[in-house]
Image (cartoon, rainbow, N blue to C red):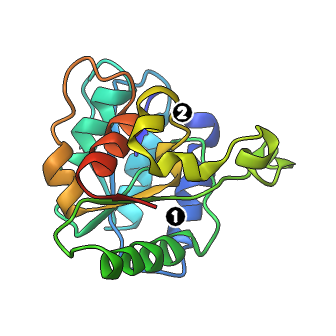
């Protein structure tokens, strides 16, 4: 998780991660020098739950660098990204984990793999605006499995992905000048492995 002045929604997001039906996870939080109560909220959860770890509190200079910092702490076989204002469905980790393991059976086990999902759009009160981001924007998510499409119009969003260790090894560190971390991760997976 990359955070920056996210006190308004952060607690709900961390609670949704702690409520996952899959219990074996670790949340690495890199904070980009917040000036609100974000850091104290994160530290409260780190004190409460050993699975929550603050890995950085220094300014990284934006979302890409901040996610880069957090990802470099992960040693897991699989990694997911989350934004500070997300709310995860209680089965998100288990569903995504099953999906990427299925893709690993299709491809080579050592291939870089990224799996993405649709997302619900909600307002600040968690009221559903749209049940499908792709449908509401008239986008075909299958285009994201084609590297040519990803190069100019990616609609893979970091908060919807799971990736394997092979992709992290191939894609990190994120190069300077990359416009968005999720686009870079998708492109690397598409060119060297699988996007599903």
Instruction: Classify 151 as above or below 12.
Output: above
Q: Residues within 10 Å of mark 1 (few under 14, many from 20)?
A: many
Give me the residue at 36% from left, 71% from top.
Answer: 25
Q: How much space separates mark 1 and mark 2, taking CA atoms?
A: 16 Å
Residue 39 seen in this snapshot: no
Instruction: Classify 120 as above or below 125.
Output: below
- Identify which residue, 131 or 10, lies in the foreground: 131
> Horizontal placement of 94 versus 1: left or right?
right
Q: Residues within 10 Å of mark 2 (few under 14, many from 20)?
A: many
Instruction: Classify 153 as above or below 106.
Output: above
Per the image, the residue denoted by label 2 is 6
Could you say whether the residue bearing mark 2 is in a helix, strand or loop?
A: loop
Give me the residue at 86% from left, 49% from top.
Answer: 127
Q: Position of residue 84 (x, y in %)?
A: 52, 42
Could you say whether the residue bearing mark 1 is in a helix, strand or loop?
A: helix
> Horizontal placement of 175 versus 47: left or right?
left
Q: Position of residue 50 (x, y in %)?
A: 31, 68
Sequence-wise, the earlier of marks 1 and 2 is 2
Occupied quadrant, residue 87 = bottom right
- Identify which residue, 52 or 194, lies in the foreground: 194
> Horizontal placement of 10 versus 129: left or right?
left
Give me the residue at 59% from left, 63% from top.
Answer: 16
Residue 172 seen in this snapshot: yes
Per the image, the residue denoted by label 1 is 17
Q: Position of residue 31 (x, y in %)?
A: 35, 34
Occupied quadrant, residue 136 = top right
């Amino acid at each position: 998780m990359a955070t920056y002045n996210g006190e308004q929604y952060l607690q709900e997001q961390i609670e949704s991660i702690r409520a996952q039906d899959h219990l074996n996870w670790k949340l690495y939080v890199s904070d980009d020098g917040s000036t609100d109560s974000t850091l104290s909220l994160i530290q409260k959860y780190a004190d409460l739950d050993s699975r929550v770890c603050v890995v950085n509190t220094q300014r990284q200079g934006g979302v890409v660098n901040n996610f880069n910092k957090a990802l470099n702490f992960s040693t897991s076989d699989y990694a997911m990204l989350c934004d500070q204002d997300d709310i995860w469905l209680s089965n998100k980790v288990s569903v995504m984990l099953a999906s990427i393991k299925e893709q690993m059976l299709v491809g080579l086990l050592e291939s870089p793999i990224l799996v993405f999902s649709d997302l619900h759009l909600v307002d600040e009160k968690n009221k559903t605006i749209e049940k499908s981001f792709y449908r509401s924007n008239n986008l075909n998510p299958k285009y994201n499995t084609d590297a040519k499409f990803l190069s100019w119009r990616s609609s893979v969003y970091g908060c919807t992905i799971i990736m394997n260790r092979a992709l992290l090894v191939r894609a990190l560190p994120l190069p300077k000048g990359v416009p968005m971390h999720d686009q870079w991760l998708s492109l690397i997976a598409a060119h060297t492995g699988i996007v599903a």
